[in-house]
Image (cartoon, grey):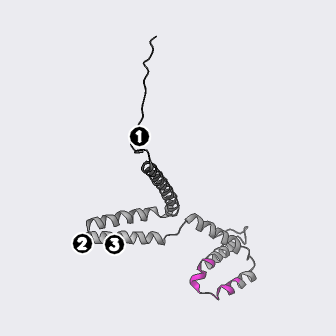
């Protein structure tokens, strides 16, 4: 068994610079810069996650609009302007889509359960009199739910008699 020769390793860091005030301030600056970069990346990731949740239902028109708009701005000709305009129209149509179809379904089923409490004809007549006081476009959904419930109640009135 041989003895290994004694080696002395010297590690030098060139990023620190010479010892003294200048080296300490440079080290503090790089630490601050790295910290700010980490915080910036973290905030960007959090923002993108929130954006992803909001865009989940609308990703197809947003993707098409983004690609067409970018392509139209890159071409910048007669056809490029038309392509960019179509892309902007896709982006605007994505804003008009409902935020979450699942949330809309849950809200509608809750509304249907609440309106099912008006089961007697007198209660339904009172509710329709209240709805008549408001414009038709703001009560369309309520009237549609009530009409569907009335049709269901009519179909289930005589279960022993066959339906035509």
The residue under label 1 is: 13
The residue under label 2 is: 78
Q: Residue 81: give x, y in percent of width and height.
A: 28, 72
Question: Per the image, is 137 magenta?
Answer: yes
As helix, strand or loop, the secondary structure at mark 1 comes to loop
- Depth order, front residue of 67/22: 22
Question: Per the image, is 140 magenta?
Answer: yes
Disc 2 crowd rating (10 Å Cα; few below 14, some 14-19, many 20+) is: few
Q: Residue 118: give x, y in percent of width and height.
A: 73, 77
Does residue 2 sit above or below 137 in this rendering?
above
Q: What's the distance in space between the residues labelled 2 and 1, CA to CA?
A: 57 Å
Does residue 43 sit above or below 126 in this rendering?
above
The nearer-to-camera label among 3 and 1 is 1
Q: In this image, 124 relative to 15: left or right? A: right
As helix, strand or loop, the secondary structure at mark 3 comes to helix
Q: Quadrant of residue 110?
A: bottom right
Range of residues picked out in magenta? 127-142
- Depth order, front residue of 90/18: 18
Q: Residue 45: give x, y in percent of width and height.
A: 49, 56
Q: In this image, 132 relative to 61: left or right? A: right
Q: Residue at x 66, y 69 (%)?
A: 163
Q: Which badge, 2 or 1, is on the more N-terminal residue?
A: 1
Does residue 19 sit above or below 119 in this rendering?
above
Q: Which badge, 3 or 2, is on the more N-terminal residue?
A: 2
- Depth order, front residue of 115/147: 115
The residue under label 3 is: 85
As helix, strand or loop, the secondary structure at mark 2 comes to helix
Q: What's the distance in space between the residues labelled 3 and 1, CA to CA?
A: 55 Å
Residues at discs 3 and 2 in contact (Cβ within 8 Å): no
Q: Residue 151: give x, y in percent of width and height.
A: 65, 74
């Amino acid at each position: 068994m041989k003895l290994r020769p004694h080696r002395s390793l010297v590690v030098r860091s060139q990023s620190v610079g010479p010892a003294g005030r200048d080296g300490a301030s440079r080290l503090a600056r790089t630490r601050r810069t790295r910290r700010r970069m980490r915080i910036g990346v973290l905030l960007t990731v959090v923002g993108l996650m929130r954006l992803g949740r909001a865009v989940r239902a609308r990703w197809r028109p947003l993707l098409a609009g983004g690609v067409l708009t970018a392509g139209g701005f890159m071409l910048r000709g007669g056809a490029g302007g038309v392509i960019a305009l179509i892309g902007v129209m896709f982006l605007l149509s994505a804003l008009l889509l409902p935020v979450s179809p699942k949330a809309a379904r849950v809200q509608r089923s809750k509304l249907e359960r609440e309106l099912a409490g008006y089961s007697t004809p007198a209660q339904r007549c009172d509710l329709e009199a209240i709805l008549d006081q408001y414009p038709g476009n703001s009560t369309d959904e309520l009237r549609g739910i009530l009409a569907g419930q009335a049709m269901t109640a009519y179909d289930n009135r005589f279960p022993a008699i066959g339906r035509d």
